[in-house]
Image (tube, grey):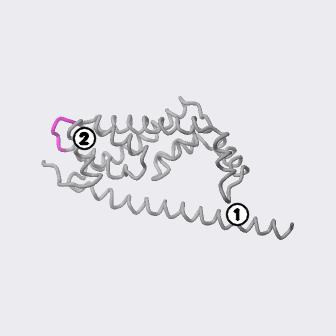
Amino acid sequence: MSSPNLDGVAGWAINLMETLGGPGAGLAIALENLFPPLPSEVILPLAGFTASKGNGNMGLFDAVLWTTLGSVIGALALYAVGALLGRERVVFIASKLPLVSVSDIEKTEAWFAKHGRKTVFFGRMIPIFRSLISIPAGVERMPILIFTLLTTLGSLIWNTAFVMAGFLLGENWSLVEDYMGIVSKTVLGIVILAVVVFVVVRLSDRRKGKHHA
């Protein structure tokens, strides 16, 4: 089975996997964690497709193992960014941003303290949040062993599903990208809507404050 002629991210990813095998797939996913515009919905099915060709460079088990390892390494790197940033810097940055107050940070901290473990686990299976959730986990200094375990389990489920899809679909692996593109756009739309609602509510609160003053 010959490789398809692919351009862009897909072409780069499949060349990396065919050259390096499993470690190439792991490297691609580690970079996807650090740079969210690199879509795992493309890289993971491609890893499965590459494994299905049976050229000896990477089998199905290798694809799942190395992509999960890459996910954990990328997540730990972002966790370190959050830990180095720290609460004081986050509060300082928040105090300088319009429409954001220190109380917002405190509410987020309280929420993360209560739901952080579930968020890290399930967040690994949500587009966009897959990468970003590692930063607040680092800021809040979630125990590193727990973070690593939850990230590994969540990533293993997500990666296995997409690698298997690419493996079974073969040349039609791009169907996964098509369907997940809809999901990613939906999640992005929800995030934008949430931001708009937050801004509207905060501006309304400020107007009410000025009126009472």
Q: Residues within 10 Å of mark 2 (few under 14, many from 20)?
A: many
Whole-percent x and y of residue 169?
Answer: 24, 53
Residue drawn 32% across the image and 52% down it: 42
- How far, Cα to Cα, is label 2 from label 1? 47 Å
Q: Which residues are magenta?
A: 53-58
Residue 176 spot, x, y in % from top left? 32, 56
**Magenta run includes residue 55:** yes
The answer to whether residue 86 is left or right of residue 186 is right
Please report the residue visible at 60 percent of the width from the left and 66 percent of the height from the top.
Answer: 196
- Of helix, strand and loop, which one carries label 1? helix
Task: Please check the rendered image and state whether residue 205 is part of the magenta-colored stretch, yes or no.
Answer: no
Residue at image coords 48%, 35%: 76
On residue 44, the disc is none
Q: Which residue lies under the disc numbered 1?
A: 202
Up-down: is 63 above or below 178?
Answer: above
In the image, what residue type sits under mark 1?
Arg
Extreme residue in the right direction: 213
Image mark for residue 17: 2
Name the N-terminal-most of marks 2 and 1: 2
Residue in front for this viewpoint, 124 or 202: 202
Give the left or right position of residue 135, taking residue 24 as reference: right
Question: In this view, which residue lies farthest toward the front?
Answer: 96
- Name the magenta segment's main secondary structure: loop
